[in-house]
Image (tube, rainbow, N blue to C red):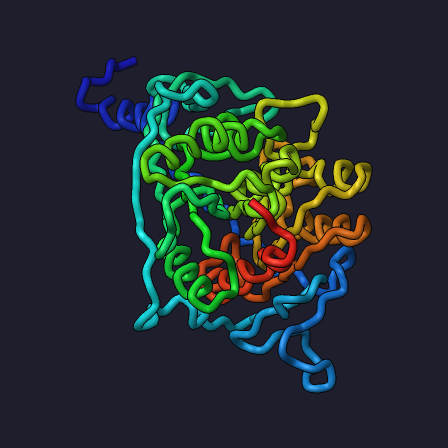
């Protein structure tokens, strides 16, 4: 048999090498994008009986709300808004309304006794690394620097105990503006806002996941012992110790973190707002006391415990996350999770307002632009009548 020359076998070598490149570290074709979550029906089984806002049942055969309208600020229960949204007027600066002061400082992981910093990404691994087993995520040290943004209301007198609202995943450019207007209209008390950036990453094995998705009071302890003292020292602010004078806000995992602050420390927080709250099975590290993570709130914790003094405003979008991920555990539908939260809260007699939003995705900015002022006003109902510092 005639031996082929190098030039004759070159095309075969090229083909072989090309076929092997993905296994030799060459970037393979990207994985197909996860499909967008489907719209879930507001009358699907398991959904609370929703009251459309601003439209009488006789005026429309469809489940929908009037554009720009929110549930009453003095009503508990389950409501439906959308599919059209209008930014709230409180997002517009008003001439003559005094503006609060904005300050910022940074916090390094090296200075934290509670959160020294972790990551799920192996040394040298890609930033978008996904652990193969979400029930046994390996973590590695990773330092971080976070920014804390502080809003101090106009006219605040140093040393006076002030109500406070703590925002996760901060800052939010709309919150100070909304507070300026609501405080000027005497719809909420003059309060300090502490907007805390997370420590980085997302979900199981990340610093953000450890802070927000862990089922414990650890994050509230961090805020109380490491963040608030810096705020008070840096700016001459005194934060009220009264839980009636404290609120927490968050979106997604920041939302379940806000609820956990009140659940595990009701002596510190009574008022909570969550947008697209991650009340799903996403906690890491695994805790045998709460094996299903945030899903435990509506599965066991709220139904099986006496009511706590928590006032909760919660929201979900009909196109919110549906992420079965590798666990395939049936506990990763954000719409179902929030429906179940509302049902559990109602059964136990909590003060809650549930807002189900049509034509809305996860942590939807257009929904927040319409609802944030009235969510704040609702969650602070009853403060002036009962509170003392």
Q: Nearer the viewer, residue 141 or 374?
A: 374
Q: To which quarter of the image does residue 183 belong?
A: bottom left
Residue furthest to the bottom: 59
Quadrant occupied by the N terminus = top left
Q: Is residue 8 above or below residue 266?
A: above
Instruction: Pinpoint residue 20: horizontal percent, then vertical percent.
Output: 36, 24
Instruction: Pinpoint residue 22: horizontal percent, then vertical percent.
Output: 37, 27
Q: Is residue 2 above or below residue 380?
A: above
Q: Is residue 193 left or right of residue 40?
A: left
Q: Residue at x 70, y 45 (%)?
A: 309
Q: Nearer the viewer, residue 69 or 37?
A: 69
Q: Residue at x 68, y 83 (%)?
A: 60
Can residue 226 be seen from the camera position used here?
yes
Instruction: Pinpoint residue 138: horizontal percent, then vertical percent.
Output: 50, 18
Q: Residue at x 30, y 41 (%)?
A: 104
Q: How many marks?
A: 0
Instruction: Pinpoint residue 65: horizontal percent, then vertical percent.
Output: 61, 74
């Amino acid at each position: 048999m005639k031996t082929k020359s190098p030039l004759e076998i070159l095309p075969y070598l090229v083909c072989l090498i090309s076929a092997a490149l993905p296994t030799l570290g060459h970037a393979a074709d990207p994985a197909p994008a996860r499909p967008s979550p489907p719209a879930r029906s507001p009358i699907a089984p398991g959904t609370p009986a929703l009251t459309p806002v601003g439209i009488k049942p006789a005026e429309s055969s469809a489940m929908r709300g009037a554009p720009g309208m929110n549930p009453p600020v003095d009503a508990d229960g389950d409501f439906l808004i959308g599919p059209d949204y209008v930014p709230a007027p409180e997002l517009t600066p008003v001439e003559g309304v005094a503006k609060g002061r904005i300050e910022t400082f940074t916090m390094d992981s090296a200075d934290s006794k509670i959160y020294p910093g972790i990551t799920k990404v192996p040394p040298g691994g890609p930033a978008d690394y996904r652990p193969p087993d979400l029930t046994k995520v390996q973590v590695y040290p990773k330092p971080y620097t976070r920014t804390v943004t502080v809003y101090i209301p106009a006219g605040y007198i140093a040393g006076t105990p002030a109500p406070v609202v703590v925002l996760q995943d901060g800052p939010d450019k709309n919150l100070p503006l909304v507070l300026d207007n609501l405080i000027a209209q005497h719809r909420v008390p003059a309060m300090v806002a502490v907007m805390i950036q997370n420590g980085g990453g997302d979900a199981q094995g990340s610093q953000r996941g450890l802070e927000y998705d862990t089922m414990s009071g650890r994050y509230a302890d961090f805020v109380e012992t490491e963040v608030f003292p810096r705020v008070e020292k840096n700016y001459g602010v005194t934060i009220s110790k009264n839980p009636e004078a404290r609120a927490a806000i968050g979106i997604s995992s920041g939302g379940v973190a806000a609820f956990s602050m009140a659940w595990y420390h009701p002596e510190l927080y009574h008022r909570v707002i969550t947008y697209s709250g991650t009340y799903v099975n996403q906690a890491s590290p695994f805790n045998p006391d709460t094996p299903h993570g945030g899903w435990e709130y509506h599965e066991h914790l709220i139904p099986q415990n006496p009511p706590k003094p928590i006032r909760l405003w919660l929201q979900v979008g009909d196109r919110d996350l549906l992420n079965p991920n590798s666990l395939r555990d049936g506990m990763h539908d954000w719409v179902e999770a929030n429906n179940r939260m509302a049902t559990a809260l109602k059964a136990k007699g909590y003060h809650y307002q549930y807002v189900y939003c049509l034509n809305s995705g996860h942590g939807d900015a257009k929904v927040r632009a319409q609802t944030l002022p009235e969510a704040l006003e609702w969650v602070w109902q009853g403060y002036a009548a009962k509170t003392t510092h």
